[in-house]
Image: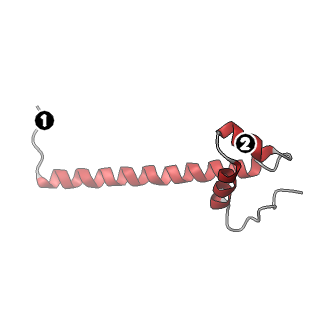
């Protein structure tokens, strides 16, 4: 049987859990950003790609627009990849 924790052990554990949780949140945000930036690039591949992406993800086109705008780098214009 493991020993009962004291206050110091509990505080240390809470700190470690908080750090792990923070790392998870940071990684989640990084992955979401990468995903929506990639979708932003893909939607300009051909006319109608945004609808095809929405269908593939089972979401509405409006959600694609909102999310890609949300995660688009500040220095990137919406039509920067088109040429």
Q: Nearer the viewer, residue 5 or 29?
A: 29
Who comes first in sequence, dot 2 or dot 1? 1
Residue 55, by quadrant, is top right
Residue 75, by quadrant, is bottom right
Q: Give the secondary structure at mark 2.
A: helix
Judge whether 19 appears above or below 54 on screen: below
Residue occupying image coordinates x 72% and y 42%: 53
Residue 42 in the image, given as x and y percentages of width and height? 76, 46
Q: Nearer the viewer, residue 23 or 57?
A: 57
Judge whether 14 appears above or below 58 on screen: below
Spot the residue most to the bottom. Answer: 75
Q: Give the secondary structure at mark 1.
A: loop
Q: Of the numbered discs in the image, which one, if any, rests on residue 2?
A: 1
Classify residue 5 as left or right of residue 68. left
Residue occupying image coordinates x 40% and y 55%: 22
Spot the residue most to the top. Answer: 1
Classify residue 79 as left or right of residue 75. right
Visual colour scheme: secondary structure
Q: Nearer the viewer, residue 83 or 57?
A: 57
**Which image quarter is the C terminus in?**
bottom right
Classify residue 60 as left or right of residue 7. right
Residue occupying image coordinates x 65% and y 57%: 66
Task: Kindly identify which residue carries mark 2.
Answer: 53
Residue occupying image coordinates x 13% and y 54%: 7
Residue 69 in the image, given as x and y percentages of width and height? 67, 60
Foreground label between 2 and 1:
2
Say few, some or many: other residues with alpha carbon within 10 Å of mark 2 (under 14 / 14 to 19 / 20 or more).
some
């Amino acid at each position: 049987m493991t020993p009962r924790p004291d206050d110091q052990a509990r505080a240390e554990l809470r700190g470690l859990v908080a750090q792990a949780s923070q790392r998870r949140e940071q990684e989640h945000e990084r992955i979401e950003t990468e995903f929506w930036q990639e979708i932003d690039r893909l939607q300009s591949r051909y006319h109608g790609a945004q609808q095809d992406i929405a269908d593939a993800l089972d979401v509405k086109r409006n959600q694609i627009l909102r999310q890609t705008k949300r995660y688009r780098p500040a220095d990137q214009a919406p039509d920067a990849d088109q040429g």
